Amino acid sequence: MIFIELVLQNFGPYSGTQVINLDPRIDDNNISPIILLGGMNGGGKTTLIDAIRLALYGSRAQCSTRGNLSYADFLTQCVNNQADPINKTRIELVFEHIEDDKPIQYRVVRIWEKNPKDGKDSLGILGEDETWPVEHLANIWDEYIENILPLGISNLFLFDGEQVKELAEQETPPSVVVDAINALLGLELADKLAVDLEILVNRKKKENADTQDLAKLAEIEAKLSEQLDKRNVIKKEQDYLKDILAELELKHEEAVHKYMAEGGKIAAESSKLDTQKETQIKNIENVRQDLRELAEGVLPLALIPNLLSQIQIQSEKEFKLQQVQLAKDVLIARDERLISLLNQLDLELAKINRIQTFLTEDIDSLYAGNSSSEITWLNADEESLSLLDNLVYRLQTTQNHTYQKLRELQDYEEEILRIERQIQTAAAPEEYAKLKKAREKSQAELTKAASKFEVINRSLTELEATINQTKKELNNYTSDNLKYHSNEHLINAATKVQQTLQIFREKLTLRKLNKLEEEVKNCFLYLLHKSDLVHRIAIDEKNFSLSLYDLNGKQVPKHRLSAGEKQLLAIAFLWGLAKVSGKRLPIAIDTPLGRLDSSHRNNLVERYFPAASHQVILLSTDTEISKPEHQTLKENGAIAREYLLEYNSKQRETSIKEGYFW
């Protein structure tokens, strides 16, 4: 389905006849999905969405400004204030869809005047050439449009920023989204069929009841009707208390946050902080005592590291010289014994002298590098050297221990500073009393509201049990006392169908919700551009609330999401629902960017708008789709047409011109 053209005549702020070309096809070869309409707040953007809804659904349309007005009063309200009473108000919507595998166009025309006769408009449907009306189609228009764009799911394709905001802030989807989900999943049809079967069964039982049976049956039905009315009243009160409870929870959260931020908790724990400070002071004194004990030992020698090093080097040199001298004396004694032996062997004197010379030169060359002329002033023996090495080792160990104690001292001192800062930031006694009183008051109000809400829930549960009992009584009475005759087979068959229908509804819900969960998750991750936040999204089969889970299967609380992430989740929910519907339908979005920050806004502009559908009608202010976002969409070739809604505050009229704010 594609919207081709929208014509407004004296509708809302649009005076005269104004035409908007909505066709996303620029030519036969080029298609850009986005139709961009810019306008300031109050300039008539929402009116365009209402016009599309009104053209398609007439008295069934869920328009933004209708409220509880009758259809006649709503039509009167839509007439332009400046229009000549003689001129009628008119809406025309041209759309194209596939019928019998061929594209076909229809022009839906609704015309009415102020204070319309019979309280309704005049509907006309023009065919392909727009010269002849399709009378039979106008007579069955509600059934026909339900096959193309059902009213139940229209809120998934025609929505505004307020709807996204409401969906983002509530734990469970609002009623319009729940209705759309029921229609999308086919549950609406199943529920209607179940109700129709129950009506049929009761009708058939009444046909065979005698006068006394009918009177008893009427009494039970009246009681059931009264109970159902009471249930509706309690449900309304439950919804009201639910809203009050949500407001009080927010108020209490703000009071607790203020109490914490302004030092209430620290003031309440001041004695604990004082105890912690005293403990740290004792720890510091213990460390300082350890340091004093360390200073009484070898630690002062750390002041002369160079002298200790020189002593070690000198002692090692002197010890080495002693060793060399001892070795030299041993060799000289050995050489003397060798010369004496040679003299006894009657060798030639010249040879003995040569051997003696060789030995003397050999000793001199061996010990040439270790001269005995070195100055020796320590005269340290081996035991002294060992004591010196032990002293140096003990000094290094003591220094490491000292550094460790100094770090401990620094940590304790920093902890004392931190505790003192906490004590300093604590609220004054008077302010603390006010903060505490505000917190306790909000807690009391919240507890009281929660108690009322619980009482209402219990009352509703009890009433539901009573209703079920009355239904059972009604069923038993009719089953036991009425004569079925020829209708008995039909009633039994209808009962079996109802049971089968309940099973079918449950299985259908699970199967379609699984597909919806996957689509919503994929859409959310695509918009968020942060794949590590959510691994799975689960949708409750009863109230359709969303639950987020991380990669470890742990639930991600919704309050941990930023406001922007919540809005992206809401848009992903609507987008996923639209995808699961399986229908190729246009999407119209009024004030789409709300409170989004720049990064999330860019994600929508770049990822959602061009891909949301084959036709996306955006109605935006200049701050939502500003110059950078507009430039991005233009550069990506996503915009087919642009219009500007110029509102004249003096005349209270809006005119439509081509182009955007820039």
Image (tube, helix red, strand yellow):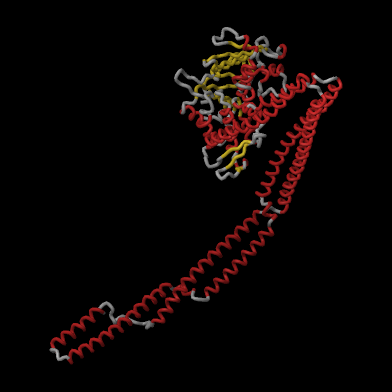
Q: Residue at x 74, y 36 (%)?
A: 241
Image x and y of residue 14, in percent: 61, 17
In this rendering, is residue 344 above or below 95? below
Image x and y of residue 154, in percent: 62, 24
Residues 490 and 348: in front is 490
Q: Quadrant of residue 18?
A: top right
In this rendering, is residue 607 above or below 531? above
Q: Is residue 381 visible?
A: yes
Q: Quadrant of residue 42?
A: top right
Q: Residue at x 58, y 41 (%)?
A: 549
- Furthest-right residue in view? 212
In this rendering, is residue 9 above or below 243? above
Residues 309 and 80: in front is 309
Task: Give the position of the N terminus as an image quadrant.
Answer: top right
Image x and y of residue 98, in percent: 54, 17
How many marks can you see?
A: 0
Image x and y of residue 193, in percent: 69, 24
Q: Residue at x 58, y 71 (%)?
A: 289
Left or right: where 336 falls relative to 640? left
Left or right: where 28 falls relative to 22? left
Left or right: where 102 falls relative to 379? right
